[in-house]
Structure formats: structure tokens, C-alpha cells
Image: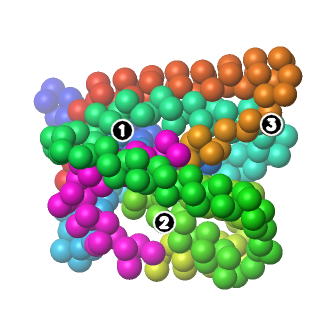
């Protein structure tokens, strides 16, 4: 009896981790969403960063529990790319509004997580500083109307941004790629398994993980509250800059886009509620 219960519990744990990995994989590729933020919400971010920072030391203890997460992440990441490219091409404004709603609905859980280890005095200073920096960067990119021709080096940069969205909670790789005109071809290449895009993207991602994972892990270990509030500032600024204001030109468009935003908010709140009811052990 106990053995069957343990097997059912193990199967449920595996399935939950796979589903969480799928959502993280979706978050890694969806505009405005950070796979790292979803990892934090699911309680998976810390063991992932510990593994990336010390792969040899933590291999035996961290890899087995993370296998279903990795499997789900691959499914979510590759499975959504073609669908995402289709909706972004056919229904760009409603699609982006759904993403904006998802991020907005996750903000309460982000603030809750930021204060998990206690609120530090002056925590909102890095938040507003990061908001100002992101506004300045993105507004500057829009004013200069920078567009680049996709090539091997730019796809290396795309891989860097993608990895950063996983190891730095709150950073979405679409934040920099969209203003440069790189997001759509990069996602389309992933969806069609284009090796000319996947290979440089993978190289850029691996280099980023090797170079930055230890530094980011140390930052969150020593300045968790301040660093996380800074990330929240980045999330808020990037989300505001993603709003398709031109898509609110008619009453019909306003109605559709607002419904899409509300649907995203509701989905995020339901996801947070579902996750809060699930208690799983981390490595």
C-alpha cells in the first residue's frame, strides 16, 4: 500500500515538474516574460543556479530532480515557437496584450518573492533606478529606430539575451531583440529548427551561462532583496514599453486588447494560486 502511494506521489511530482518546465520553456520564448521569473515562482531557480554555478560539485544532487524540468523546458521552448510566430504575425497587438497581462498578473508574486528573505531599507531605490535605466535604453532605441541585418554575430547576441532571461529573473530576451528587429526571425528560426540560427544562438547562450551564472548567483545570495527589486523595476519598465498603444485606435481594438490583457492577468493569478498549493522538495 505504502509503495503504491509512494509511486503515485513520485509520478505526481514528476508530472508537476514537467509541467513547470513547460511553462518555464514558454516563458523563455514569449515576449515580455522571463523564464527566470517563472523559475523563482516555482521554487526551481535556486537549484538551477546552484547547478550552473558549480556543475561538477552539484551534479549528483541537483540533476536527477531537475531532469523533468529540463524535459518540460525543451518541450515548451520548441513547441511554442511556431505557434508564437504565427500569432505574432497574424494578431500582433492582441498577442502582446496577453503577454502584458501575464506579466501584470505575476507582479504580486514577484513582490512577495522579493521580500521572502526580509525587506531591506532602500529596496525601492534599485527598483526605480532600473526602471529609469530601461526606459532610457528602450526610448533611445525607439528614437534612433535602430534596425539590424540578422547574421551569425547578431544571433550570438540573441543567444546571450535568451540565456540572460533564464539566469537573471525578470530579464526577457524580447526586451532587446524586438527594438532591433531580431525577435521574429530568431523565434521563427527556433520554430523551424534552422541550424544557421540555432547554432550561434546556442553558442551565445552557453558562453553567457559560463561567464555570468556565478556572478548572478553571488549577487542574489548577498543582496537578494535589493537585486530582486531591481529586477522588478526592469520588468515594469519593459512591460510598459511593450504596450502597443497604436493598437488602441478604435473602440473595437480597445475592447479586444483589454480582454486579452484581462485574460493574461487571470491566467497568471490562477497559475500563482495553483503553484502556491503545490509543495515540492527542491534539491
Query: How far apart, in angstroms, are the residues tagged by discs 3 and 1?
Result: 29 Å
Q: Is residue 230 magenta?
A: yes
80 shown above or below 15? below
> Counting other residues with Cα less than 10 Å from the Cα at mark 3, is it few (<14), some (14-19), or many (20 or more)?
few
Eye-nearest disc, 2 or 1: 1
Q: Under tag 3, what secondary structure? A: helix
Q: Residue under label 3, please give it.
A: 246
Q: Is residue 117 visible?
A: yes
Q: Under tag 1, what secondary structure? A: helix
Q: Residue under label 1, please give it.
A: 110
Q: Quadrant of residue 15?
A: top left
**Between discs 3 and 2, the one toward the N terminus:** 2
Residue 31 location (% of width, % of height): 62, 48
Q: Quadrant of residue 99?
A: top right
Query: How far apart, in angstroms, are the residues tagged by discs 2 and 1?
Result: 20 Å
Q: Is residue 152 left or right of residue 89?
A: left
> Counting other residues with Cα less than 10 Å from the Cα at mark 2, is it few (<14), some (14-19), or many (20 or more)?
many
Q: Is residue 264 left or right of residue 129?
A: right
Identify which residue is drawn at 52% across, 21% down. Answer: 266
Q: Residue under label 2, please give it.
A: 163
Residue 197 location (% of width, % of height): 70, 73
Identify which residue is drawn at 54% across, 66% down. Answer: 161
Residue 30 location (% of width, % of height): 60, 47
Eye-nearest disc, 3 or 2: 3
Query: How far apart, in angstroms, are the residues tagged by discs 3 and 2?
Result: 31 Å
Identify which residue is drawn at 25% across, 58% down. Answer: 220
Q: Is residue 218 magenta?
A: yes
**Between discs 2 and 1, the one toward the N terminus:** 1
Observer-nearest of 258 and 137: 137
What residue range appears in magenta?
Answer: 208-237
Amino acid at each position: 500500500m505504502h509503495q503504491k502511494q509512494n509511486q503515485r506521489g513520485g509520478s505526481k511530482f514528476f508530472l508537476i515538474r514537467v509541467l513547470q518546465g513547460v511553462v518555464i520553456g514558454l516563458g523563455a520564448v514569449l515576449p515580455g516574460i522571463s523564464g527566470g521569473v517563472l523559475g523563482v515562482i516555482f521554487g526551481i531557480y535556486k537549484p538551477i543556479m546552484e547547478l550552473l554555478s558549480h556543475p561538477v560539485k552539484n551534479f549528483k544532487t541537483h540533476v536527477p530532480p531537475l531532469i523533468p524540468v529540463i524535459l518540460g523546458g525543451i518541450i515548451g521552448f520548441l513547441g511554442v515557437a511556431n505557434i508564437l510566430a504565427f500569432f505574432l504575425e497574424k494578431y500582433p497587438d492582441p498577442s502582446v496584450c496577453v503577454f502584458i497581462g501575464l506579466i501584470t498578473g505575476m507582479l504580486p508574486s514577484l513582490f512577495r518573492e522579493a521580500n521572502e528573505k526580509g525587506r531591506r531599507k532602500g529596496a525601492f531605490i534599485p527598483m526605480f533606478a532600473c526602471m529609469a535605466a530601461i526606459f532610457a535604453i528602450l526610448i533611445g532605441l525607439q528614437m534612433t529606430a535602430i534596425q539590424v541585418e540578422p547574421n551569425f554575430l547578431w544571433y550570438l547576441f540573441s543567444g546571450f539575451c535568451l540565456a540572460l532571461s533564464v539566469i537573471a529573473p525578470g530579464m526577457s530576451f524580447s526586451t532587446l531583440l524586438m527594438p532591433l528587429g531580431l525577435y521574429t526571425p530568431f523565434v521563427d528560426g527556433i520554430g523551424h529548427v534552422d541550424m544557421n540560427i540555432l547554432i550561434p544562438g546556442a553558442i551565445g547562450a552557453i558562453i553567457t551561462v559560463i561567464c555570468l551564472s556565478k556572478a548572478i548567483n553571488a549577487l542574489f545570495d548577498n543582496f537578494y532583496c535589493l537585486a530582486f527589486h531591481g529586477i522588478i523595476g526592469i520588468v515594469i519598465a519593459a512591460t510598459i514599453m511593450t504596450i502597443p498603444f497604436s493598437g488602441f485606435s478604435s473602440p473595437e481594438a480597445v475592447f479586444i486588447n483589454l480582454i486579452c490583457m484581462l485574460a493574461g492577468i487571470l491566467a497568471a493569478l490562477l497559475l500563482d494560486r495553483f503553484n502556491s498549493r503545490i509543495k515540492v522538495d527542491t534539491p
